[in-house]
Image: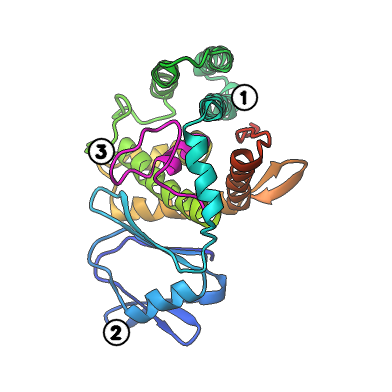
């Protein structure tokens, strides 16, 4: 196990020797070697931890993340060993104000639309093999997304570029979410995409999965020495990890939406995201990170490919190297 997530109230986590130990009362629930861990996420309030654990994480390059009651990451701790090179951040700040930042943002949205299309076609292939009429709706929406990705790639980047880009992304998103609802890939209780404060179980599962994705990419950004709060597509606001949000766009559909679709029958049986379902989302998410994906003529674990993408972004910012968004094959 590389990533440990605690999502249950009343548990304690500490360190004994070279192992992270999770307990509930006097009962030991699990022990995990420090050398194998990359991150620890406390996704529930009321989890106790020791200062020795924080020091052990810092000394072993393990990031420590805390989520609030909305399942949003609000604290991320990293040791002083992270690659915080001043020149990397200076170049990042300059890049964020340059015309190249607009082109990179456009490429990110093209990648997002391509991966939404791939997600639909992935499940459409199964529906078609089973003779479901909904496969036609998926193919039709996939065609719309393909056309809109081409439209985005040709979009002029004038002074209103961000509004134009996000406007096209929003139109594509409406087609995408409507297709998931109409084809039964999401439960009937799903009426449309809703972020914070969502009351239906599907949106709650999506939001929880995106929070896990945010923590994973936050770690990648820090490892690369970049500033999480300075992005290009998402505007800067106090406390908003704009660069992390930018990078998430490439992975939302293929990494999180796909696992929620896979869980649709279990989600349909519940009115809200209970602890059992949360544990299932965590398990599916980490299995996805550990899965093998094609990346630049080789196969890598997805989490390794995500980290390399951020390193490629550094090369794009500092040396003008070509950046191509992640495109998943269905």
Q: Residue furthest right?
A: 297
Label 1 with label 3: CB-CB less than 8 Å = no
Q: Residues within 10 Å of mark 2 (few under 14, many from 20)?
A: few
Alpha-carbon distance for marks 1 and 3? 36 Å
Mark in front: 1 vs 3: 3
Q: Residue at x 78, y 41 (%)?
A: 297
Q: Residues within 10 Å of mark 1 (few under 14, many from 20)?
A: few
x then y, percent, for residue 174: 39, 18
Q: Main secondary structure of the magenta part?
A: loop
Q: Secondary structure at mark 1?
A: helix
Foreground pick, 233 / 49 = 233
Foreground pick, 200 / 67 = 67
Alpha-carbon distance for marks 2 and 3? 36 Å
Which callout, 1 or 2, points at the residue further toward the start of the chain? 2
Q: Residue at x 61, y 48 (%)?
A: 311
Q: Residues within 10 Å of mark 3 (few under 14, many from 20)?
A: few
x then y, percent, for residue 287: 54, 53
What is the magenta range?
225-252
Q: Residue at x 73, y 41 (%)?
A: 296
Q: Residue at x 53, y 66 (%)?
A: 1
Q: Which residue was labeled with disc 1?
A: 129
Which callout, 1 or 3, points at the residue further toward the start of the chain? 1
Q: Is residue 121 left or right of residue 166?
A: right
Foreground pick, 3 / 130 = 3
Mark in front: 2 vs 3: 3
Q: Which residue was labeled with disc 3?
A: 196
């Amino acid at each position: 196990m590389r990533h440990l997530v605690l999502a249950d109230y009343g548990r304690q986590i500490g360190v004994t020797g070279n192992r992270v130990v999770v307990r509930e009362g006097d009962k030991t629930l699990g022990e995990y070697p420090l050398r194998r861990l990359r991150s620890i996420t406390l996704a529930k309030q009321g989890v106790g931890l020791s200062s020795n654990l924080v020091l052990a994480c810092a000394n072993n390059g393990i990031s420590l993340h805390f989520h609030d009651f909305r399942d949003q990451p609000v604290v991320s701790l990293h040791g002083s060993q992270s690659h915080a090179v001043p020149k990397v951040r200076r170049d990042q700040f300059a890049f964020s104000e340059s015309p190249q930042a607009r082109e990179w943002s456009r490429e990110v949205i093209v990648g997002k639309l391509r991966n939404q299309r791939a997600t639909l076609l992935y499940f459409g292939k199964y529906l078609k093999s089973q003779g479901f009429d909904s496969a036609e709706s998926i193919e039709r929406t996939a065609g719309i997304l393909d056309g809109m990705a081409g439209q985005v790639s040709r979009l002029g980047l004038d002074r209103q570029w961000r509004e134009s880009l996000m406007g096209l992304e929003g139109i594509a998103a409406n087609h995408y979410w409507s297709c998931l609802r109409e084809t039964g890939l999401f439960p009937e209780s799903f009426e449309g995409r809703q972020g914070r404060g969502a009351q239906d179980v599907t949106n709650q599962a999506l939001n929880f999965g995106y929070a896990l994705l945010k923590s994973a990419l936050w770690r990648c950004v820090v490892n690369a020495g970049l500033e999480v709060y300075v992005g290009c597509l998402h505007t800067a606001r106090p406390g908003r990890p704009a660069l992390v949000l930018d990078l998430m766009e490439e992975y939302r559909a293929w990494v999180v939406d796909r696992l929620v679709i896979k869980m649709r029958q279990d989600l349909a049986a519940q009115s809200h995201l209970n602890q059992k379902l949360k544990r299932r989302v965590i398990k599916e998410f980490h299995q996805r990170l550990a899965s093998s994906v094609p990346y630049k003529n080789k196969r890598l674990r997805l989490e390794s490919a995500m980290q390399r993408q951020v390193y490629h972004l550094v090369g794009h910012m500092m040396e003008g190297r070509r950046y191509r968004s992640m495109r998943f094959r269905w």
